[in-house]
Image (cartoon, rainbow, N blue to C red):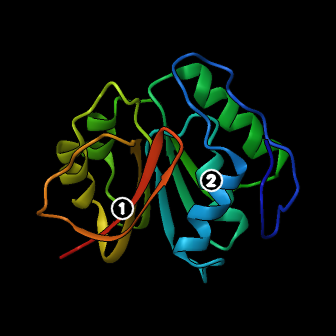
């Protein structure tokens, strides 16, 4: 797996190779960032179900100033650490918590929140409600979910696109 653009373009990052995580393919990650805008002029991001950290690492490569990485799986978080060290990234923090505990502990507000929970979780509205609490007023939530997943119409959808068995939905505040 590699970083697709920005400061660390073409750099290889380690995958988790764990049954509990699902890596976002390079081409899907590139498409997501094309939907968001190619590059950022600073800002903060949260990679809540980080796995290998690919989404947060890509955001840093493209100009985000700071990323909070969280994963409940300690082995996945160790891969995030290895990737951060290999890229010599210093502007981050790590949490090894259940997503609900992480969102309660977080005191920052984010410009971008990346969500890619296990598809079996399937409580999209609850995850969105909690995530909106740490989103800046003009921020965006990027949610990767199973293609058949449903969510409430109380959220404003900026973009939605299917990629095989998944869909990516970008939400903003109403």
Q: Residue at x 62, y 36 (%)?
A: 23
Q: In this view, does 1 lie above or below 139?
A: above
Q: Position of residue 115 (x, y in %)?
A: 41, 48
Q: Residue at x 23, y 73 (%)?
A: 173
| SS for dot 2 | helix
Quarter of the picture holding the C terminus: bottom left
Q: What label sits on residue 28 in the rendered view?
A: 2
| SS for dot 1 | loop
In this rendering, would 152 be left or right of 93? Answer: left
Q: Residue at x 48, y 32 (%)?
A: 71
Q: What label sits on residue 108 in the rendered view?
A: 1
Q: Name the outermost residue toward the bottom.
A: 41
Q: Position of residue 19 (x, y in %)?
A: 57, 16
For label 1, the crowd category at 10 Å Cα-Cα, with few meaning under 14, some 14 to 19 and many 20 or more, is some
In this rendering, would 104 be left or right of 165? Answer: left
Quarter of the picture holding the N terminus: top right
Q: Earlier in the sequence, mark 2 or mark 1?
A: 2
In this rendering, would 85 be left or right of 120? Answer: right
């Amino acid at each position: 797996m590699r970083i697709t653009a920005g400061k660390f373009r073409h750099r290889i990052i380690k995958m988790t190779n764990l049954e509990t995580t699902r890596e976002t393919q390079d081409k899907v990650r590139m498409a997501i960032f094309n939907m968001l805008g190619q590059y950022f002029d600073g800002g903060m991001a949260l990679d809540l179900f980080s796995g290998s950290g690919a989404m947060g690492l890509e955001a840093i490569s493209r100009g985000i100033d700071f990323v909070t990485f969280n994963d409940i799986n300690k082995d996945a978080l160790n891969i995030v650490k290895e990737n951060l060290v290999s890229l010599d990234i210093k502007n981050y923090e790590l949490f090894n918590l259940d997503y609900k505990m992480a969102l309660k502990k977080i005191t920052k507000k984010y410009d971008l929140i990346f969500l890619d929970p296990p598809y079996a979780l399937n409580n999209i509205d609850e995850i969105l409600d909690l995530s909106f609490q740490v989103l800046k007023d003009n921020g965006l939530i990027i949610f990767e979910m199973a293609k058949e997943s449903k969510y409430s119409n109380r959220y404003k959808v900026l973009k939605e696109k299917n990629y095989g068995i998944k869909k990516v939905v970008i939400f903003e505040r109403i």
